[in-house]
Structure formats: C-alpha cells, structure tokens
Amino acid sequence: MKIIEAMLTENSCYKLGKKLKVQGLMLHSIGTPQPRAEVFARGWNDPAKEVAVHGFIDGLTGEVWQFLPWEICGWHAGGGANLTHIGVEMGEPDCIKYKPSSATFTVSDADKPAAIEVVKRTYAAAVELFAQLCRKFELDPLGDGVIIGHAEGYARGIASNHGDPEHIWRQLGLPYTMESFCRDVAARLSKEVPENPVYITYTVRKGDTLSGIGAEYGVAWYKLAEYNSLADPGLIYPGQIIRIPADELPDEAEPVSYTVQAGDSLWKISRQLLGSGWRFTEIMQLNGLRSISIKPGDVLEIPRE
C-alpha cells in the first residue's frame, strides 16, 4: 500500500519525540466531514496544536499519510493509550452533516452512496495498514486490547469519551464493527500462507546473526545469504524477514499435539510454543487450516523445534 510521509515536524508532539513501546493499535474516525489527509497535514503541523496521530487514511484515495514515526508517542487518545498504542485516523465523507456537539449526523439519500464508498475505502485501507503494523511490531491482531477503537479505549479507561469509529459505520448501515475489523486484519495476515510453500519465513530478532539462524534451522548461513540475496551477510536487522528454503531443511521430528484453551489464538499459541507469533503460519500449514478460527477443545499439531 502507498504510504506518504508527511511528518508533523512543527508539532510539539513530534518535537517531544517520547519513545513509544508499541503494545497495540487504535483506530479513529476523524469526527468531521473531511476526507482529505492533506488538510490535517497542514492544520496539525503547528506547535500550538495539541493533537498528533501516527497515520491518517485519506477518504478519497485510500492512501495512508504518516504524520509521526511509529515508535514515538502520539496525542490521539486523550488518555493512557497515547503511551501504548499507535493511533490512526480515517477521513470522513464531506457530504455528511453532524448535529451540534454530537456524534450523530445526517446524509441525504442522494449523497449516501458516495459516503458509503468513502467509508468502505478507508476501512479496507485500515485493514491493510493494521496488518502491516501487526507484522512490524509482532502484535496479535486477535489479542485482548491489541486492536481497539477510540470508544473501546474509553471503556477501558485509557482514552477520552468518543464513539468512533463504529458510530460512522453504524449510521451508514454498514456491517462493520471493531470485532469484524480485528478478524479482517487477522484474515489479511493469514492470506500470506502459501498453498505449497517452498520456503518458511523467520523474523529477525535483536541479537540474531545469520549463522545463528542457520544453526537453528539446520541450514548453512551462506545458503541463507544466497537465497535472500544478502550483499553483506553480517548486516541483518530486527524485523527483517529471512526466507529459509524448505528443501534445505533437515527432516522434521514428529510434531507435538496441543489442545486449544479458552482465550487462545493461533498467534498466542505460536508465540508461546514456537517463540514467535509470526510462526502461526507454520501451524496453519501443518494442520491444513485455511482459516484462523480455532475454538477450545481443538487439537492442533505443533511443529517440533
């Protein structure tokens, strides 16, 4: 997806640059009839503005404008979520009209189809962006409190009293909810599972070396360097994806069984048993799963290290 860098370099939040330890993602809807990201890029790039989000989804194009580095705290939640969650705003149709001091709006029958198209566009872009951010920060999209809306943030005591983003979906008669949004983000990630994989992937962690990764999987480091077209095998970085050719892997030991417990997700099981949430795709492949849905009592085979 296209991300336009438009940092709010004059905004006091940007200048403060407080480090954010990313624990989740918060989705917002702007609450005013304005779809254009450039309007907010100009308006918020001001030392006097006490608002700053990390990303803004343009309602006309679906493009993401990045206003802050992902790893610094934003001013988007009006509460503790500023210290834990990346904040992303969605633009809203310019054909809706809010009632004074209210989250309720009206839209004419003639304008409603256009309004719905804007909201569908921002929803789809948000799903793709949140999937990318979950991958980048190794977040479980189905985990409790990981992906939330502003309204849920308020219910949890970590955000101010706002009803977004579900208020706009509901009033336009769309079937979207934050629950469906989380499922759609997880489903977007699960689409990366190949039908017949010729390689598995490994996400580099702090302190990793190519030789260490190779030793863990029984593959020579120089083969990994060649397969991943690494000009300097000594330079790898946290978050980098290393492809490990399946035909180079040694014969696998017999998998072990795991019975799904209440509150489990594929991500949680993978992180607990395999050391990385991103290895949930290996569990899906081994068990022939085409969906991320699991329920208590299901028995899964887990690859043995």
Image: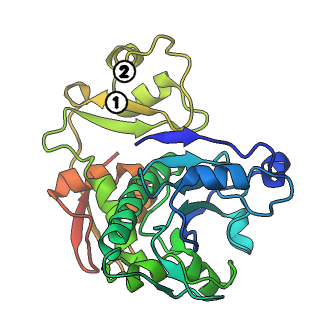
Q: Quadrant of the C terminus?
A: top left
Circle 2 SS class? loop
Q: Residue type at mark 1: give it.
A: Arg
Expressed as whole percent of the image width and height from the top left, the position of residue 74 reads 71, 58
Looking at the picture, tell me which residue is in the foreground, 201 or 117: 117
Rendering coords of residue 14 (x, y %): 78, 48
Q: Residue at x 45, y 58 (%)?
A: 59
Helix, strand, or loop for circle 1? strand
- Please give the name of the residue rendered at 68% of the width and 71% of the height, measured from the top-left corner: 77
Q: Evaluate whether residue 159 shows in this view.
A: yes
- Label 1 and label 2: CA atoms lie apart by 6 Å
Name the quadrant of the N terminus: top left
The residue pinned by badge 2 equals 228
Q: Which mark is residue 261?
A: none
Cβ–Cβ below 8 Å for labels 1 and 2? yes
Judge left or right: residue 275 versus residue 245.
right
Say above or below: 109 vs 124: below
Percent x, y for residue 23? 60, 62
- Which amino acid type is marked by label 2? Asn
Seen from the viewer's position, the closer of residues 305 and 97 is 97
Which percent across, then down, holds residue 194?
19, 43
Residue carrying label 1: 243
